[in-house]
Image (tube, rainbow, N blue to C red):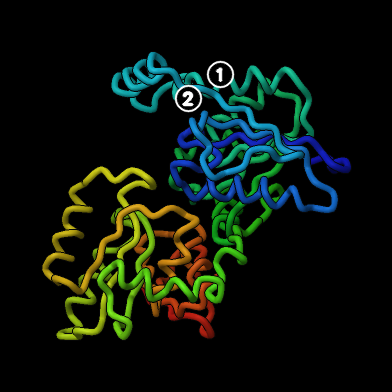
Amino acid sequence: MPTLKASPKIAIITTGAMPVPPTLGGAVEHLIYMLVRENEEAPVPFQFTVFSMAPGAVGEYPTNQRHTRWEWIERRLLHRVLQRLLLRRFGGRFSPVLKNYPFFLKAVRRLREETHDLVVFQNRPDILEYCSRRLAAPLALYLQNEYLSFPRDEMARAVIAADRVLACSSFIGRQLGAAFPTHQQKVRTVLNGIDAQLFDRGRWAHTRDSVRARLGIAPDDFVILYSGRLVPAKGADRLLQAVARLGDLPKAKVLVVGATGYSEDQPTEFSRSVRDAGARLKDRVIFTGYVKYEEMPQYYGAADIAVLPFIFEEPFGLTVIESMSMELPVITTDSGGVPEIVTAECGEILPR
């Protein structure tokens, strides 16, 4: 991969699933927006162009950055209906062009209108491989999921086509190196990060009592925090099973922060079973539903410990470093990239 010049022009292609700025939530979307903000303060900033589905109203997220140009792509109703019909008829067995129409087609068209020093594809090996035949710029794939969650042939084509593959943890990097040893030299680990000023326990100390009062938690209750989506892989059900076995601990409360999706909370069989388990524990479990990212420190600040019982290969674990930044001890599992960031000084790692 060629060395980038000073203040290079870098295009960032989002997943196309949710908007940036992250008005609907999403871990990857928040990471991209945080990168944009940090870039504004850099001594030698990059010149970013961010391609994203249109966010509608940007709300509290400023978009007047000096060093970022936003390329928002509208998804019209006709396009959404067409995409849904195609997915229903063919599943995933067709071109990335169709899977991401019209976002992808428009993004490629705009990319070809100007020169970039690097194009970064967030978690989309299918799009990168397609673009490699149409763009002259160096291409990088930034993976936030383990490669096994993608079709192997699709990932193989992307790794071959990419000039660089970025992994959010050494765990992901090792996976890629083992799967594609002849391309191992392309792989670099770039750990995720958070805004440590936002997740600063001292900054939110004044909200602890008010948040607890609003949620019906007494000042002397011991609060166990779960933060994450209500999906089987994240293990909320295992936490409630464990709490049920603790017996009568009237001062222990479980605070479950999260929805089935990010900002969306469509009930699923799993989420209903978790809520039923919480109901059996009566007033010992509080479900908050979706909480905006900027409000999350208040909920961490209301807790005494974080329990994050991943039962899959968690690629990194942003909730883990958010908890630690908020000075919470962590109980978590030997999962994916988590052991890279949790040590005996700050947490307990259990077998899944």
Q: Which mark is residue 75?
A: none
Q: Which amino acid, by three-letter code, is at mark 1?
A: Leu
Residue 338 versus residue 175 in the image, above or below? below
Give the residue type at disc 2: Asn
Q: Say if residue 221 shows up in the picture.
A: yes
Which residue sits at x=58%, y=55%? 168
Establish if 13 lies above or below 281. above
Mark 1 neighbour class, 10 Å CA radius: few under 14, some 14 to 19, many 20 or more: few
Q: Are marks 1 and 2 in contact (CB under 8 Å)?
A: yes
Extreme-right residue of the structure:
6
CA distance for labels 1 and 2: 8 Å
As drawn, 254 above or below 158: below
Measured as percent of width and height from the top left, residue 150 is found at 46, 41
Q: Which mark is residue 105?
A: 1
Mark closer to the chain start, 1 or 2:
2
Q: Position of residue 280 (x, y in %)?
A: 11, 68
Q: Nearer the viewer, residue 104 or 226?
A: 226
**Residue that badge 2 annotates:** 100
Q: Residue at x 38, y 27 (%)?
A: 92
With 250 as the anchor, is 94 left or right in this view?
A: right
Quarter holding residue 158:
top right
> Mark 1: which secondary structure?
helix
Identity of the residue drawn at 30% across and 64% down: 256
The answer to whether 221 appears left or right of 96 in the picture is left
* Res 182 visible: no
